[in-house]
Amino acid sequence: MQPKINYQKKLEELVSTLNTKPKLLLHSCCGPCSTQVIDYLKDYFEITVFYYNPNIEPLEEYLHRKREQIRFLEEYKEAKIDFLDCDYDHEAFKNVAKGLEEVPEGGARCNKCFYLRMKKTAEVAKENNFEYFGTTLTVSPHKNSTIINEIGEHISKELMIPYIYGDFKKHDGYKKSIEFSKIYNLYRQDYCGCLYGKE
């Protein structure tokens, strides 16, 4: 049995070696989850938030969450954070979820969804000369950080672009994201994104 990897420690080791602020394309699942992650990473990276979440439905919910993400970035004054939008490609999610509709939340459907969103982030990062890609997904206590980081590592090797490891729920990260959400009066959804999980 392999020892459990401390992914937040791996991130801390990385940032301790940086002499410049590399360009990071950071996949964000929603405004509330992005808050603490951005606040932590802003001192080490030039961050562009990438909003690619074809799993979120219905469309009105997707648009509402996107507006909240943009509003937070506009109101957050600690650093300038750029925003990169993406088309609402719900069919892409439907395709990867096919046959897994009845799988409980946190299972194979979620893992395929993580992979879909993170691979798109890495592809766009590589196309646009970002030096790293990453995701805010690990801030949630409902997400398996080990699986998410293993997916990131796999994609990094596949596309040859560095991935920033992390487990942003560590050091009260999730609690801090709730505090940020209160300060900025952010909408906090009561389900991850897809209606299969909501049901």
Image: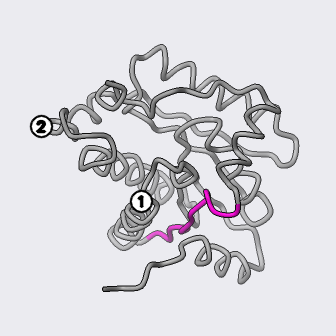
How many numbered badges does the structure rendering display?
A: 2
CA neighbours of label 2 inside 10 A, class few (<14), some (14 to 19), many (20+): few
CA neighbours of label 1 inside 10 A, class few (<14), some (14 to 19), many (20+): many
Q: Residue reaching furthest left? A: 99
Which is nearer the eye, 179 or 46?
179
The kind of residue tagged 2 is Gly
Earlier residue among tags 1 and 2:
2
Prevailing secondary structure of the magenta residues: loop
In this view, 126 is above or below 100: below
The residue carrying mark 1 is: 148
Span of residues in magenta: 161-171
In this view, 90 is above or below 131: above
| The C terminus - image quarter | top left
For the point 47% across and 38% down, the residue is 52
The residue carrying mark 2 is: 99
For the point 64% across and 78% down, the residue is 14
Element type at marker 2? Answer: loop
